[in-house]
Image (cartoon, rainbow, N blue to C red):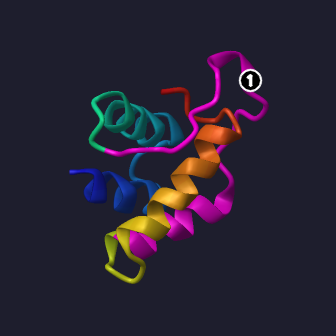
């Protein structure tokens, strides 16, 4: 289902909030493992960078692998955009 969310986010069918909530759920439930999770207090950004939409689309379309997609998600976590 997260690939569907990624595709919908990439094409604008769902918003940033729905996309990030799905990712946060997957991290909290340990479906997606993110190394070196920051403390919740270390947040710095609030908006998902536009390039993440490209990653989401490429991943949903099978053009990049799971690891490449997760690296982008790890950036979102480290930047404080996603708070697991």
Residue 75, image x, y percentages? 63, 50
50 relative to 59 in the view: left or right: right
Q: Magenta part of the protein: which range? A: 32-59
Residue 30 spot, x, y in % from top left: 30, 35
Residue pushed farthest right? 44
Q: Is residue 34 left or right of residue 33?
A: right
Q: How many marks?
A: 1
Q: Identify the residue at the far bottom of this view.
A: 63
Determine whether, in the image, residue 8 is placed left or right of residue 47. Answer: left
Residue nearest the observer in this picture, 36 or 46: 36
Q: Residue at x 64, y 35 (%)?
A: 81
Q: Nearer the viewer, residue 15 or 63?
A: 63
How crowded pointer 1 is (Cα within 10 Å; few <14, some 14-19, many 20+) is rated as few
Can you name the residue that lies furthest to the left here? 1
Q: Name the spot of residue 14 as percent of width and height, x first.
A: 41, 46
Image height check: is 37 above or below 12? above
Pick out the residue farthest to the top. 41
Q: Position of residue 34 (x, y in %)?
A: 47, 44
Q: Is 44 in the magenta?
A: yes
Question: Helix, strand, or loop for circle 1?
Answer: helix
| Residue at the spot 26% in from the left edge and 57% down from the top edge | 4
Query: Disc 1 marks which residue?
Result: 42
Q: Please tell me which residue is depicted at 20% across the width and 51% down the height of the picture.
A: 1
Nearest the viewer among 72 and 2 is 72
| 15, above or below 80, in the image | below
Query: Which quarter of the picture shows residue 31?
Result: top left
State yes or no: residue 51 in magenta: yes
């Amino acid at each position: 289902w997260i690939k569907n969310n990624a595709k919908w986010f990439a094409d604008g069918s769902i918003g940033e909030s729905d996309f990030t909530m799905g990712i946060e759920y997957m991290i909290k439930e340990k479906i997606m493992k993110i190394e070196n999770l920051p403390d919740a207090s270390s947040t710095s950004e609030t908006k998902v960078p536009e390039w993440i939409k490209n990653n989401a689309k490429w991943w949903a379309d099978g053009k990049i692998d799971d690891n490449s997609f997760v690296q982008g998600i790890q950036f979102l976590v480290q930047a404080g955009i996603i708070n697991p």
